[in-house]
Image (tube, grey):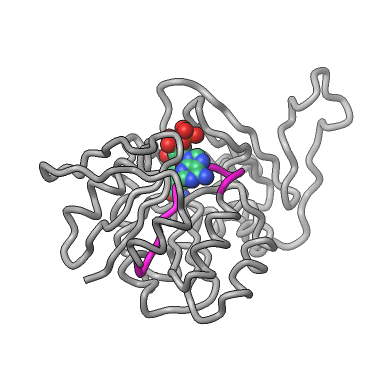
Amino acid sequence: MIDVLVNGAAGRMGREVVRTLTAADNIRTVAAVDPGHDGRPVDDGAGGELICSADLAAALEASRPAVMVDFTHPDAVEENLRLALAAGVHCVLGTTGVAEERLRELSGGAPDVCLFVAPNFAIGAVLMMRFAQEAARFMPHVEIIELHHDHKADAPSGTALRTASLIAASRGDAPASPGRETELAEGARGALVNDVCIHSVRLPGLVAHQEVIFGGQGQTLTVRHDSIDRTSFMPGVVLAVREVVSRSGLIIGLENLMGA
Ligand code: NAP
């Protein structure tokens, strides 16, 4: 049995994680943390409830989980990780917006436990990134459009940043990004990350979507992934919870747990 604390349990992702882990074999949700929901229940999807706590340190001490799953906020996540790793608790991190360098520092302070980070827990998104990385070897002219719901805190998305980094690692010299010097409105050509243009769309009605568009002579190629429901992320979260307990150190990307 793997005991799990869910951090951000009252959020859009956290609620789905509580329901999913409660239904999973050999996993037990032992604590729920969410400061804005202190003392209030979260439905576990199985006819029961978990009462949220506001105090992560106290919840770690009281419930002694093997794993913390964190879907909170970029401003809160570093402190959350610091507390959990110091308590010897493996971490499954879904919250985006933390620089890789910072993750490395945090993980380095707790070498015996695993800090697993997935910019995207959906299998289709992992494949989209892989196909984009492969295409970039042959079609180096590429731009990313990522589209998310209007409550997303960070931009560009963690998935877009990861995709840009994978593209940069696989293509040779980056072609110039044209039109930047002649923008009529600032930002019209998007953000340049690893020499890849990223455009961030935020609209109600969206969940999490990304297009990677390659341009070549007389042709384009588009690789697109759509998470139309947050359940798309749940098999990846369950896999990560099962895997981290037998691993250590920093691992970034679901592909590293899938044997893919
Ligand atoms: P959300 O609905 O705003 O949920 C976040 C929850 O965390 C809220 O209930 C929030 O409370 C709470 N929270 C804030 N500070 C906290 C703290 N210090 N400790 C514990 N809980 C805290 O956001 P979401 O849509 O679930 O997304 C959460 C994160 O997951 C975002 O960074 C998002 O980009 C990321 N995400 C990742 C993936 C992936 O596959 N890796 C997929 C989807 C989303 P308040 O509302 O009171 O502030």
What residue do we see at 31% from left, 64% from top?
A: 239
Q: Quadrant of residue 111?
A: bottom right
The residue most toward the left is 47
* Image quarter in which the N terminus is found: bottom left
* Image quarter in which the C terminus is found: bottom left
What residue do we see at 65% from left, 57% from top?
A: 165
Q: Is residue 222 visible?
A: no
Q: Is residue 31 visible?
A: yes
Q: Is residue 59 rendered to the left or right of residue 111? A: left
Q: Which residues are magenta?
A: 65-76
Magenta span: chief secondary structure: loop
Residue 162: in magenta span: no
Asked if residue 74 is positioned above or below residue 23 in the image, the reply reads above
Q: How many marks?
A: 0
Residue 68: in magenta span: yes
What residue do we see at 48% from left, 65% from top?
A: 116
Q: Nearer the viewer, residue 255 or 150?
A: 150
Asked if residue 16 is positioned above or below residue 36 in the image, the reply reads below
Q: Is residue 129 rendered to the left or right of residue 166? A: left
Q: Quadrant of residue 199?
A: top right
Residue 123 position in % (x across, y down): 36, 55
Residue 245 position in % (x across, y down): 36, 75
Q: Nearer the viewer, residue 238 or 43?
A: 43
Q: Is residue 168 rendered to the left or right of residue 163? A: right
Q: Nearer the viewer, residue 47 or 248?
A: 47
What residue do we see at 27% from left, 39% from top?
A: 42
Residue 162 position in % (x across, y down): 59, 54
Asked if residue 178 is positioned above or below residue 167 in the image, the reply reads above
The residue most toward the right is 181
Q: Quadrant of residue 212?
A: top right
Residue 53 position in % (x across, y down): 38, 45
